[in-house]
Amino acid sequence: MKLNYSISVLNFKKAYLVIGFFCFIGQFSIAQDQKLSDSLEVVYKNGDFEENSELEILKLLAESETDTDKMISYSLQLIVAAKSKDSVRYEYSGYMQKGNGHKLLSDVTQALESYFEALRISKEADLKPEEATVNIAIADVYSIMGDVDTAFEYYRVGLKLMENASGDPLTLAYAQFNFGDEYLNIKELDSALYYLNKAGKIFEEENDKVGKAYYLGNVGLVYAEKEENDKAESNLNEAIDLLESQGDYYGISIYVNAMSDVYTARGEHNKAYDYVSRSLQLAKKHGLKDQVSDAYLKLSDIYEKNGNFKRSFDNYKRHIIYRDSVKDLDQIQKAASTETDYKVSQKQLEVDLLNQQKRTQKILVFAIAAILLFIILFAISLFKRNKFMKKTNEIIASEKQRSDDLLTNILPEETAQELKEHGEVKAKQFDSVSVLFTDFKGFTEEAGKLSPEKLVESINFYFSKFDEIIKKHELEKIKTIGDAYMCAGGLPFPVENHTAKMCQAALEITEFVKKTKRSFNHKLAKFDIRVGINNGSVVAGVVGTTKFQYDIWGDAVNIAARMESASEPGRVNISESTYQILKEFDVFKFTPRGEIEAKGKGKVQMYFVDYVD
């Protein structure tokens, strides 16, 4: 349960409109305040402020808004406005709040992009407190992604910067809270309580109600992990009451969901179901996809314990759908309505000018004055419109770049560019390609021993490491099918020595799986793996019209699959064509296996490959 915050939020001073400008009085800590946001939105839309207050109003709107889409919209407007006025601090604030909004929507890629931009700005401008804050925010995202090592790395950097800077104590408290939360995630409960209590003491001293609520909630989660359910229930209920008074539905959804675990542990499944249903309703209402996903997973577990396996499976499928979904940003402004307003005002001007021409000579002077007045008003209106369109175009360009980046993440860069330019991708033949298949031995049997959650977590753990290895060796991931993993080398662009690189990657994969199986430091599934490699000619292209998929076909692919199925656990099995290429490299040694029957191919010469001792 991570807390979103920024230095400006923690030191925020309440704003009141007084005769066209803002007076700032009284310090208090906020997270998101919808009443404040609604008041500021009225002021901003009516234009009842001086020009030099625009950046501060946009910053406060982005920080106090509870609607994540609006939060991101105001953040984008703040970034554009800050760049136009060369304000580094406000530009930093814009990227921070944009990252917070994407994090609430579970869009971790966009959250990290925004946070890293904020980190770049803070470093270049030597803003130490801001640099500390964004390091903690980056750590929070890696925590959500399950990358514990990277999360702790950024937490330590952030805390060290904060301890060396004489900033607001609440800044340090929120960082300590999130550090403690990370220890909670990895079940190091004593360390979690240590940091949570340090943060809670500051929240109490500073009378920070939101911080205190989250502190109580996370302490409740710790007690739940320790199976001290009475203490857990007491702390969670107090946290929920405080958050309801603040209108913080994100936290309420998390802790209401946690209450279901308390009642599940007591065997009170009906009460557990009621709490999960309440959490699901809140998460859906406020667009909190991560919490919707968690609620469906809890419902799946409850139905499974009650023996209703159909409903359990249905809810688990909904959990997967929400977990993998990506919510795109809506258009922030619509140029069409602006164009319509302009045409209406232009038409009205023409009517006024025509009426003015029909006036008598006696009021000619007044007519000319009126015409000049309208021309001046029109010029001012045109100037404002051009300024507005410039800002809007900058926002649109930024969103287009985001879409392009997303497409490149799905398809190879060359293929993505062809799709954008021509609307389709022509199939291409590649004469020399290395193809690799992996498969977990005994996967079906092992899967039956695991909960759906642990099974998915295990597969993600292994495949994420495979992705890292493949990327390091300049190879191209093609797809995963169940527990099978497929990649290729030498496409969509030439790669020197791709066969040797493919073999190195295969040996690293088998070593990683062996090491994971020997480890006692995790509760994930422990598999054996078979790997097969073949070289030859393939055809590559994109299939589908809505969810694009880059894929390869050909006899070389089929033989590679046979190499995998004919392999043995922990070994890399290669074909004759792959052997003829690899034998030139003195780093590999080969064990001939002779001719082995391959389904649909007859007897095929095969070899095991290893590094030279």
Image (tube, grey):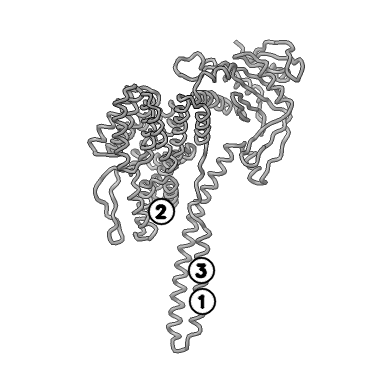
Tag 2: amino acid: Lys
Q: Residue at x 24, y 50 (%)?
A: 25
Q: Earlier in the sequence, mark 2 or mark 3?
A: 2
User: Is label 2 in a helix, a strand or a loop?
Assistant: loop
Q: Is residue 491 visible?
A: yes
Question: Which of the two residues, 570 or 495, is positioned nearer the viewer here?
Answer: 570
Instruction: Give the Cα separation between the discs numbered 1 and 2.
Output: 39 Å
Which labelled disc corresponds to residue 344?
3
C-alpha separation, residue under disc 2 versus residue under disc 3:
32 Å
Between 320 and 488, which is closer to the camera in this rendering?
A: 320
Residue 15 x %, y %: 29, 52
Q: Nearer the viewer, residue 577 or 342?
A: 342
Residue type indicated by callout 3: Val
Badge 1 element: helix
- Which class describes the residues within 10 Å of circle 1: few (<14), some (14-19), or many (20+)? few
Could you tell me which secondary element the residue under label 3 belongs to?
A: helix
Q: Residue 283: x and y, percent?
A: 42, 39
Q: Vertical placement of 528 versus 142: above or below?
A: above
Q: Earlier in the sequence, mark 1 or mark 3?
A: 3
From the image, tell me which residue sits under label 2.
85
Mark number, residue 351: 1
